[in-house]
Amino acid sequence: QSALTQPRSVSGSPGQSVTISCTGTSRDVGAYDYVSWYQQHPGKAPKLIISGVTERPSGVPDRFSGSKSGNTASLTISGLQADDEADYHCCSYAGRYSLVFGGGTKLTVL
Amino acid sequence: QVQLVQSGAEVKKPGASVKVSCKASGYIFISYYIQWMRQAPGQGLDWVGLINPTGGITTYAEKFRGRVTMTRDTSTSTVYLELSSLTPDDTAVYYCARDAAAAGALDHWGQGTLLTVSS
């Protein structure tokens, strides 16, 4: 299956909000409410920040929120902080026990 | 605490095979699927496949079928990823992660294993 489509980069100033999109197809993002998002700092393993489209694991600030409309999922980060500067990856269940990831988005906090 | 500890970095020549391990602790091993991903330098994550530790059933991404084998040892709570016929394009960090429902909510990750394929 083809990778999900994410913007290569987004940026925002401290305190602002940014939204990262993740576009798939009717066979993955559009078919299942199993979209997850991961934050990855340089040299580190990814960290789960959103699962099931909208659910935040314990310990993840409510500044991070997820949504989905049709074949596109979105991650919104409000009240940007310096430590939010990282790569963000979306992931969708794609049926038959398979997953598909996006290409990743680099968030720069100006 | 939940931990997934992977084996160390590997350097292989083209055409060789590699076997990477992922040892789980801090939870009931057979209660979670293990997913494998890889990340080439400067690239996004690429799904490799998953294994169900309960019965050892596997699902592999189409691009790796025929070259990848995932196994598990329940006595040591360890899963293995073996990749054969390596090419330089296989150079990447390989990650294991646990998944409660095989639907992509990967709540704990290994530290990653760097595989370098070079002649």
Image (spheres, coloured by chain):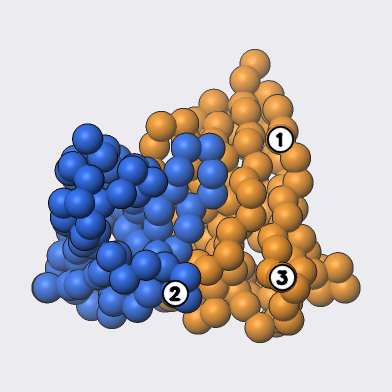
Determine the chain carrying the residue at label 2: A
Q: Nearer the viewer, mark 1 or mark 2?
A: 2
Q: Is residue A22 visible?
A: no
Mark 1 highlights which residue?
B9
> Marks 3 and 1, how far apart in space?
24 Å
Q: Which mark is residue A35?
A: none
Residue A4 in the image, given as x and y percentages of width and height = 26, 55
Task: Identify the residue shown where x is 21% and y is 60%.
Answer: A78
Answer left or right for B76 relative to B111: right
Disc 2 is placed on an element classified as loop
**Which mark's residue is nearer the viewer, 3 or 1?**
3
Q: Is residue A83 visible?
A: yes
Callout 1 touching callout 2 (CB < 8 Å): no
Chain holding disc 1: B
Amino acid type, label 2:
Pro
Residue shown at 57% from the left, 40% from the top: B93
Colour representing chain A: blue
Q: CA distance from mark 1 to mark 2?
A: 30 Å
Up-down relation of residue B116 to residue B8 (above or below): above
Q: Which chain is orange?
A: B
- Please name the residue that numbered disc 2 is placed on: A57
Tag 3, which chain? B
In the picture, which quadrant includes the C terminus of chain B?
top right
The lab-note entry on whether marks 1 and 2 share a chain reads no
| Position of residue A46 measured from the top left corner of the image (x, y, whole percent) | 48, 53
Quadrant of residue B12 within the rendered picture = top right
Quick one: SS at disc 1? loop
Residue B1's label in the rendered image is 3
Please name the amino acid that badge 3 sits on: Gln
Q: Residue at x 69, y 60 (%)?
A: B4
